[in-house]
Image: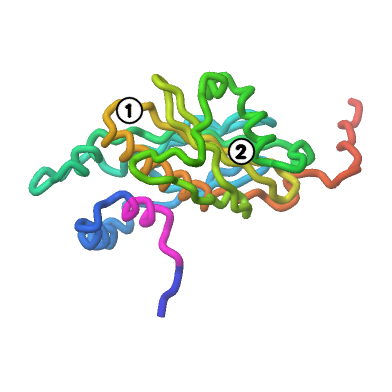
Amino acid sequence: MNTARPSITSRVLTARLPIGLLALALVALGSIGCATETKVLQTSRFTLSYPDFWKVDKVGQKDGEATHVTIGRYSTGVINEGSGQSDIWEAQQADVDVRIYSWPGEAAGAEPIKKAIELMATDPDLALDKMAIISDSSHECGRTFKAKMNVVKNDVYPVEMMSRPGFRSILVGGTNNGVLVGVAARVPFEPDPGLYCHNLSNMRTQMQLLLDGLVVKAGAAPAPGAPPPAPPPAP
């Protein structure tokens, strides 16, 4: 029996579809298996495996510089026959804007997620200073979201933030192999409650799928007390 884990691409596709369309999606995946692939992004500190329909807008080259990924819909096609409200929201679904950051792990201190958010706040593109933290007791979309996410082998409760107008954001952070990683995902704030909840649910799903593909490289950070690299020989 083949027990291999489904590819990131197949998990993205099936996670987004209503249950009634799940069987159709699985059939479709079998017919387009050669049309999609998993790509791997390499930086000095981490790798990211991702479906080829995600867009890498920028790769961070230094500490605190964001690697920017945009997660859009797999297809621009819309099913109209027998479609309900969820299909209408699917057609209007916002792209998920994700930024991945990394720093030397010794900066993390006792609470890596707090330090990661503090450092991410220095990126003016995120505008975290204009956002408010959503309380744990908030009943968004008729329920309380209180679930951990796994980021570089750390199970953490995400920090939920929002600005109105502006964005609905989710932030996480953790350390592994001597590297501190911070990840921020966001979608535009949507005044329509139904579309807001649809976008929020999709963002949670896509963010964890991204975190599943995020791996810190072994030996990405120098050992404590390691001497700096020798300068190049003089000409």
Task: Find the magenta span and give its range.
Answer: 5-15
Q: Name the image quarter holding the C terminus.
A: top right
Q: Main secondary structure of the magenta part?
A: helix
Q: Amino acid at mark 2?
A: Gly
Q: Which residue is mark 2?
A: 182
Q: Tell me if residue 127 comes above or below residue 149 in the rendering.
A: above
Q: Tell me if residue 31 comes above or below residue 68 in the rendering.
A: below
Q: Position of residue 44 (x, y in %)?
A: 67, 41
Dots 2, 1 in contact, CB < 8 A: no
Q: Disc 1 on helix, strand or loop? A: loop
75 or 37, which lies in front?
75
Give whichever of discs 2 and 1 has the lower sequence position: 2
Q: Which residue is mark 1?
A: 190
Which residue appears at 25% of the width and 40% of the height? 90
Q: Position of residue 65 (x, y in %)?
A: 62, 28
Residue at mark 2 to residue at mark 1: CA–CA distance: 25 Å
The outermost residue toward the bottom is: 1
Q: Amino acid at mark 1?
A: Glu
State left or right for residue 10 relative to residue 122: left
Q: Position of residue 128 (x, y in %)?
A: 55, 24
Image quadrant assignment for residue 28: bottom left
